[in-house]
Image (cartoon, rainbow, N blue to C red):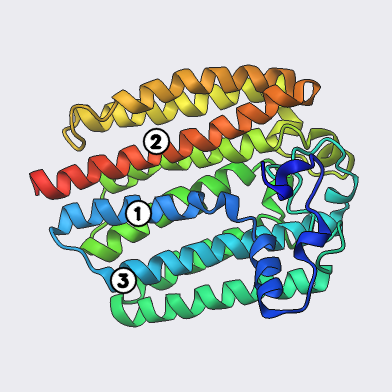
Amino acid sequence: MSRETAGPTGPSPEIYAGDTPAATARRLFGATRPKFFPASVLPVLAGTAWGAAVAGAFDASVFSLALLATVCVHAGANVLNDVGDDQGGTDRQNEDRIYPYTGGSQFIQAGIMSQGNMARLGVSLLAVAAVAGLLLLLMRGEMVLWFGLAGVLLAVLYSLGPVRLSSIGLGELSVGIAFGVLPVVGAAWLQSGTIDTAALMFSLPISAWVAAILLINEVPDIAADAATGKRTLAVRLGERGTSVLYTAIHLFAAVIVVLMTVNGDLPLAAPLVPVVLVVLALRAAAGIRTGVADRDSMTKAIEGTLGIHTLGSIWLIACALYLAIFVS
């Protein structure tokens, strides 16, 4: 177990102390919550593999820029989410968090970075994403602009501004779109120049798996979120209702893969892994029902959900690569 994850409540300020370039880089990187980066990297890989299968070719420069833009939007959204939750008081009074998975990075609360520095970091990351997006715009045309605007808008409105999608029960949907539909379909379009129903359906299981990550991560935060008026779906549904919705999300992902296989859009073996993942999701759903009363079970459920997203996404990438190599 690393020093950072040894404590259940937050990061150690000593690990991130110092003014050297290395210490500053470690601090800035840690503030972005990099443990969750697979949620943005894997969708881009999946969409790229799908687009390459459709086009019969792979554009490495376009892929690299798309990956940079998506990860920077994700990192910026994470940082700005911490700023928004600190402003609302949620993270300051969250005593049930399971660090490092729930309750934000805790960098502001631990005194590692100020709210202002976090805000500037978040905006800077979105600016880097904008530069990468501009280059893609010059290479691929105005459609890039709409994908980029949608992603940045969802990233900002999730935590900040008068809307705060996470507070009105739309956080899961917005995250599913921002880290599923947009990067998968967008990356596929960048490679192939086409958007069709099959590409959209291909993005839906990944959208579902990433939405499930957010949903389960909200469970330990129910008390703190409710106390500050952040009415997430977990707050609205409670632990038992959240468990039911969580299971339904994973069933939805498996059904979509089955339908695509029946339609001939995916290899015959494609449903095997998603069906197994439903079984794993049922175990995690049991952890949701106990909530923070059993922290060990809740932690394993969160880690299992991250694993489901990773395994499922890698499997779909493999299916798309199979189509690109052996079918196209």
Mark 3: amino acid: Val
- Quadrant of res 267: top left
**The disc label shown at residue 45, or none:** 1
- Quadrant of res 128: bottom right
Viewer can see residue 318: yes
Circles 2 and 1: CB atoms closer than 8 Å = no
> What is the x, y in percent for residue 150?
50, 63
> What is the x, y in percent for residue 180?
45, 48
**301 to the left or right of 203:** right
In this figure, which residue is indicated by the disc labeled 3?
62
**Which comes before the other along the chain, label 1 or label 3?**
1
**Which comes before the other along the chain, label 3 or label 2?**
3
- Is 37 located above or below residue 144 in the figure? above
> What is the x, y in percent for residue 327?
9, 44
**The disc label shown at residue 18, or none:** none
Q: Residue at x 31, y 31 (%)?
A: 257
Looking at the figure, which quarter contains the N terminus?
Answer: top right
**The disc label shown at residue 312, or none:** 2
Marks 3 and 2 sit apart, C-alpha to C-alpha, by 24 Å
